[in-house]
Image (cartoon, rainbow, N blue to C red):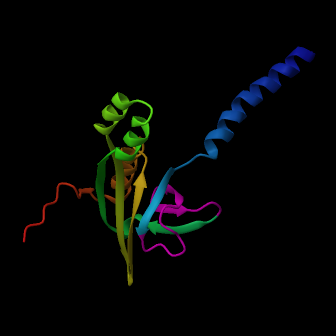
Amino acid sequence: MRKTGFRWLALVLCLLVPTAVFAGENGYKVMYDGGSLPGVKTGEKIHLMIEGDKIRFAGDHEDLIVLPANTITEISYGQDVHRRVGAAIGVAFISLGAGALLALTKSKKHYVGLTWADGDKKGGFAMQCDKSDYRGILAGLEGVTGKKAVDSDAMTVKN
C-alpha cells in the first residue's frame, strides 16, 4: 500500500513540474533599442508575448503596452553586422594567430521594428532579438497582424 502512494506522488510530480516550468516561460525576451515606449530605457530587457489578437510587452512585473494586432501598421527587420575587432585585440595579447583569426569573424545583431496607429495614438520602436528567436518573432507577428515584414537592409534610398 505504501509503494502505490509513492508511485502516485511520483506521477503527480512528473506531470506538475514540467507544466510549472513551461508556464513561467512564455513569450520572447528582447532588448528595447529605442522608440516611443514611456518609461523604458534603451538596452532594457523586456518580454514580448504574441497572443491571439494582441501583442503584449511587459517589464519585470507589469505590462508596458498592449497593442491590438489590427493597429500594427508596419513590421520591419534589419541586421547590424560588424567585425569583432575589440575581442580580437584582447585575444591577440595571448595569441597573435588566434587574435588574427578572430578579427576575420563577423557578429550579427537582429532588430525587429514595429509601428502602430490606434486612432490618434501613434508610435513605434525597435527591439534587438536573439539570433535563435528573431525568425519566430517575425513569423508570430506576421501571423497575428496579417502584415508582411519589410527587410530594411534590402531597401535602397536613391537621391
Q: Quadrant of the C terminus?
A: bottom left
Q: Position of residue 123 (x, y in %)?
A: 38, 75
Does residue 34 lie above or below 141 as drawn? below
Up/down of 159 relative to 8, above or below? below
**First to last magenta residue range:** 35-61
Residue 88: image x %, image y %? 37, 40
Please indicate whether residue 16 sits to the left or right of residue 37 in the image.
right
**The N terminus lies in which quarter of the figure?**
top right
- In the image, taking residue 100 as reference, residue 26 lies left or right, namely right
Q: Position of residue 137 (x, y in %)?
A: 40, 50
How many discs mark residues in the rendered view?
Answer: 0
**Residue at image coords 47%, 66%:** 42
11 vs 40, left or right, is: right
Q: Is residue 134 above or below residue 2?
A: below
At 51% across and 68% down in the image, what residue appears? Answer: 41
- Whether residue 130 sits left or right of residue 102 in the image: it is right
Q: Residue at x 43, y 36 (%)?
A: 93
Q: Residue at x 36, y 71 (%)?
A: 116
Q: Nearer the viewer, residue 51 or 134?
A: 134
